[in-house]
Image (cartoon, helix red, strand yellow):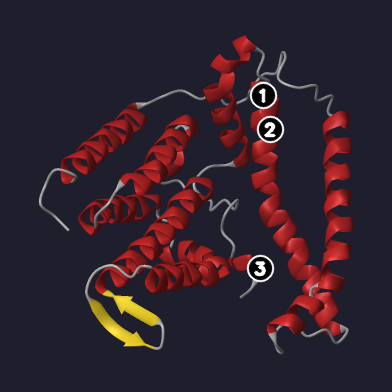
Amino acid sequence: MAVRDITLGQYYPGESPIHRLDARTKIICALIYLVSLFVVQSFSAFGLSIVLLAVVVMISRVPFRFISKGLKPIIFLIILTMIINLLFNTSGTVLVEFWKIKITDAGVYRAAFMGLRLVLLIFGSSLLTLTTKPIELTDGLEKLLSPLAKIGLPAHELAMMMTIALRFIPTLLDETDKIMKAQTARGADFENGSLKQKAKALIPLLVPLFVSAFRIAGDLAMAMEARCYHGGSGRTRMNQTRFGRGDAMAFIVMIIYVGLLIGSRYLPLY
């Protein structure tokens, strides 16, 4: 697995209708979609989620292969989650039994269900950052949190921190890739050996990575000070965000999607 396979926090340039949506629309719709994945209790409902995600991916014109790269870093977590659900769910009809291990039809169902949920979670969250510029994401988060500023919540600072944290992911991945290549050129081996040996090989990688992270953070702070940055007070924006016809259509689609999900809970589907 290459560190560049992590897609969360990266931006994929484009001029699709999804890219042109207001950042607030994309944030709200993404939150509704991610929450809905924890509400559904059947594969039929997941089918609705898959259809919606597939349509959004096609409209966004982000290559599916590029989005699917985000699964590689957590493929071990997905497999582990499926194995745990497969082995520890003993209800239902026993399909395979050996020693003290029982694999039932309910366990298989639950393992596939949880694995699919994790995959959709990664796709849904990655699509938000892939189609939204960091500055637009900051402005969108700030405007969504601005009503809370009346009770003393620093909306701008919180939005800035979350956006910088997301933006630092691809930056640190690039630094990690450079350090790994430099260490490999010096004879380090990150691919071969046991799991314990691979963990030890990462130790020489962590120290320069932390040093590089602090250096990048220092450079960013100096650049913000040089530009007289002082928070959200009196700050102006070159591009003003406003809702359009596409945003209204997006909300209508999400309302229909939520309505279909609610309806699926009362239908005899599996």
Q: Quadrant of residue 28?
A: top left
114 relative to 139 in the view: left or right: left
Relative depth, front residue between 32 and 54? 32
Labels 3 & 1 near each other (Cβ < 8 A): no
Q: Which residue is mark 1?
A: 156
Is residue 57 visible to us here?
A: yes
Q: What residue type is disc 3 on? A: Val
What residue is shown at x 56% (from left), y 59% (from top)? 7
Picture coordinates of residue 215, whole percent (x, y): 89, 50
Location of the N terminus by quadrant is bottom right
Determine which of the numbered discs, if any, sits on residue 226 in the image.
none
Picture coordinates of residue 183, whole percent (x, y): 84, 78
What residue is shown at x 37% (from left), y 43% (from top)? 33
Q: Quadrant of residue 6?
A: bottom right
What residue is shown at x 89% (from left), y 37% (from top)? 222
Q: What residue type is disc 1 on? A: His
Q: Which residue is mark 3?
A: 3
Determine which of the numbered discs, if any, sits on residue 160 in the image.
2
Picture coordinates of residue 173, whole percent (x, y): 70, 61
The furthest residue to the left: 268
Element on which disc 3 rests: helix
Reading the chain from its start, which is encountered first: label 3 or label 2? 3
Element on which disc 2 rests: helix
Q: Residues within 10 Å of mark 3 (few under 14, many from 20)?
A: some
Reading the chain from its start, which is encountered first: label 3 or label 1? 3
Labels 2 & 1 near each other (Cβ < 8 A): yes
Relative depth, front residue between 194 and 177? 194
Q: Residues within 10 Å of mark 1 (few under 14, many from 20)?
A: some
193 relative to 145 in the view: left or right: right
Instruction: Using the image, determine if residue 58 lies above or below residue 149.
Output: below
Q: Distance between the Cα atoms at labels 3 and 1?
A: 31 Å
Q: What residue type is disc 2 on? A: Met
